[in-house]
Amino acid sequence: MADLQRAAELLLGWDNILILSHRSPDGDTLGSASALSRALIALGKSVQFRCADEIPEKFAYMFSGVRFGDFEPEKIVSVDVADKALLGTLEPLGEKVDLAIDHHATHRFFAKETWVDGKAAAACQLIAKLIPALGAEITPEIADCLYTGISTDTGCFKYPNATPETYRIAADLIECGAHAADINRVMFDTKSRAAIELLKRVYSDMEFYCDGRCAVLCLTKAMIAETGAKEGDLDGVAAIVRQVEGVQFGITIRERGENEYKVSLRATEPADAAAVCAQFGGGGHKGAAGCTFFTTLEEAKTRIIAACGDALHLQ
């Protein structure tokens, strides 16, 4: 298992580096990739970036002005990827990853070397420590990327994964020039008309089980198409089901393909989302985890609700 110093040593000795983010990219995987890319390029490294899915428009600013190289990668680094399956169509590259940097305690090891800190609130929290260790400067542009990842993975610092160290790192990033207020407004307070239409459907279709302790919403391809919602409009929807008073498990089931449904599970203590998702080959954190079912929507819904109900009875 690698640590901060080992990760820095490896990166300093490499050139022609490909950085990978997980599919359905969020602020943390993109913030980690963009910040690390900027730092390595500033050190004279040649860097490429790849993600199986398109970068949502609201995150595009993190890659503005970044000059990626055109070369055959010699080394591959993944950021915020807990399982090579999360690379989506890029999963074959998972076998070739030289260094994985992640903050999921349920990380399934796939890289030649791995730096995992399950206590970190976000992968960007690790990258914020790695960049100075590389001898690179955290510029305002890098600070914006890192702050975005930390803010989005902590729900704007509302989630219990935000530790004192998380707040200290965020404060340091603001001192480095991160536009915290602007980022928080865009990430949490700004929604497109399509997102509002989708939320109207979500609220009206939400279902409750286990005496109101389990809330479920389903996002089908038809629903997304009808509202005109884009990938970025779906960000944050999974947190809505946990906001209902009395709900301990918030379940969002999204149709990904034919008989393929991605479950995003959110939990309020003492409920454990990671423990439930682990039963189905998934993982994540106690407060937020995920898994995938290759079956019908009704079957996926029945199985995840039953597992959440069993977990609630054990409390």
Image (cartoon, helix red, strand yellow):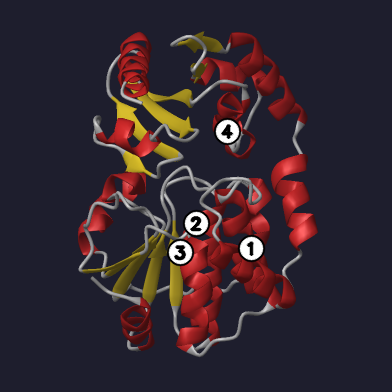
Q: Earlier in the sequence, mark 3 or mark 4?
A: 3
Query: Which residue is under mark 1?
Result: 147
Residue pointed to by mark 2: 121
For numbered disc 3, what is the local secondary structure?
strand
**Crowding near pointer 4: few (<14 within 10 Å), some, many (20+)?**
some
Q: CA distance from mark 1 to mark 4?
A: 19 Å
Q: Is residue 172 above or below residue 204?
A: below
Name the residue nearer the viewer: 222 or 238. 238
Nearer to us of marks 2 and 1 is 2
| Location of mark 3 (residue) | 49
- The amino acid type, in three-letter code, at marker 1 is Tyr
Judging from the image, what secondary structure is the residue with disc 4 in? Answer: helix
Residue 239's tag is 4
Q: Position of residue 35 (x, y in %)?
A: 55, 70
Q: Residue at x 54, y 59 (%)?
A: 163
Judge depth for marks 3 and 2 and give the one in front.
2
